[in-house]
Amino acid sequence: MSIYPERTSHDLHLKHVVNNAVGPFPANCAGYMNPPAAGWGYIAALKLSIGTVAADMDTGLDGIVSYDRAECEDAYIGQINMLTASSFCGVNGAVWGYDLARHDDLAAGLVKPLMMLPRHDGVEIPVMPMAPLLDAAYRLFGSRNQRRFPPLPGSMVVCANKSRTINPERETTVWCALAIAIAQDRLTTANLFIEDSSDTETTGEAPLVDIDRNIARSILLCGADQGVAYQQIFIGHKALKIKKGTVGCALACVPYVTLPHDAIPRNMHPEVLVDLTLSQWEQALDLDPMAPYPGNYRG
């Protein structure tokens, strides 16, 4: 039996994906491919975080703690075994905050392009700020102090990810960046993630001057190489100055998960999430409001 639904409408396809992206646990997301999931689908959620610690142990231990803190900052994905994957959200995947539980700012058309760039066929496509998608992941997983549906502690979670850990000799900026390109034909082609991270001690200030445009250009080059048309790009980055005596870790990460049963409104099929905005999903579950998404980010 093929995993691919009939080619009817895009929304129907997404509903097939979401119906097949429910894990076995009541209150925790599960990593994609963790048994016994209910089907073949998965949900991608986007996260940018920076963690810091005083450099008073040794290089390895300081790096472990700063990375761990990056996992716990903003959208909480602590206590997981992170497995690194390549960077696509495929035909059997959906994006949290975009395809399902769509962020209210996106649904209302309030998010305006940062720029327009031509793809390989000459069509101009919008490059949008990532803030709504980062906020959506934060409101799915919860925070360190207010958890909602985080990945099951100790679970194996496949993630597109890239990180940079730095123990600088002088004040240095550590940064991470993330983008997703939304494919025009979601039935035959994949969305693309680009993750990047570094520090100005290594590269100088130049990469941060025009990072959004350069990442978008890299996406469009990949699209030309693959013959894939992307209809929209979302981009964001975070940066933090790190003083000597401090270790900083910048993490760009996209966990691929299945949803817990408790994240589905009672007596409804999972596919209903395709028709709900993020705030409607929160209201349907009667969730306590989250504190605003933390600052220190662009996009």
Image: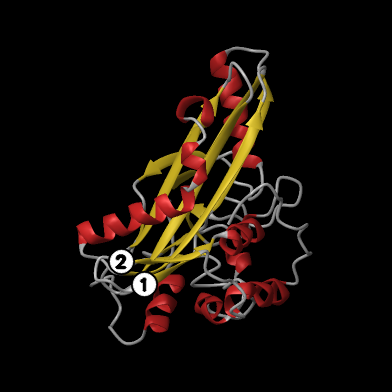
Residue at x 71%, y 51% (from the top left corner): 294
Establish if 17 lies above or below 219.
Answer: below
CB-based contact (under 8 Å), mark 2 and mark 1: yes
Q: Is residue 42 visible?
A: yes
Regarding mark 1 in the picture, which secondary structure is present there? Answer: strand
Which numbered marker is on residue 250?
Answer: none
Establish if 222 lies above or below 171.
Answer: below
Establish if 217 lies above or below 96.
Answer: above
Give the distance between the C-alpha atoms of the residues marked 2 and 1, in whole angstroms.
Answer: 6 Å
Please tell me which of labels 2 and 1 falls first in the chain.
2
Around disc 2, counting alpha carbons within 10 Å, would you say few (fewer than 14), some (14 to 19), or many (20 or more)?
many
Closest to the observer, 173 or 184: 173
Left or right position of 120 against 161: left
Query: Residue 171 falls in which quadrant of the image?
Result: top right
- The quadrant the N terminus occupies is bottom left
Q: In the image, what residue type sits under mark 2?
A: Arg
Q: Position of residue 117 (x, y in %)?
A: 38, 65
Marks counted in the figure total: 2
Q: Position of residue 281 (x, y in %)?
A: 65, 74
Regarding mark 2 in the picture, which secondary structure is present there? Answer: loop
Establish if 284 lies above or below 257.
Answer: below
Q: Is residue 152 visible?
A: no
User: Which colouring convention does the figure follow?
Assistant: secondary structure
Say which residue label 1 marks.
124
Say which residue label 2 marks.
119
Residue at x 55%, y 15% (from the top left corner): 59
Closest to the observer, 224 or 258: 224
Residue at x 29%, y 74% (from the top left corner): 187
Left or right position of 2 against 218: left
Q: In the image, what residue type sits under mark 1?
A: Glu
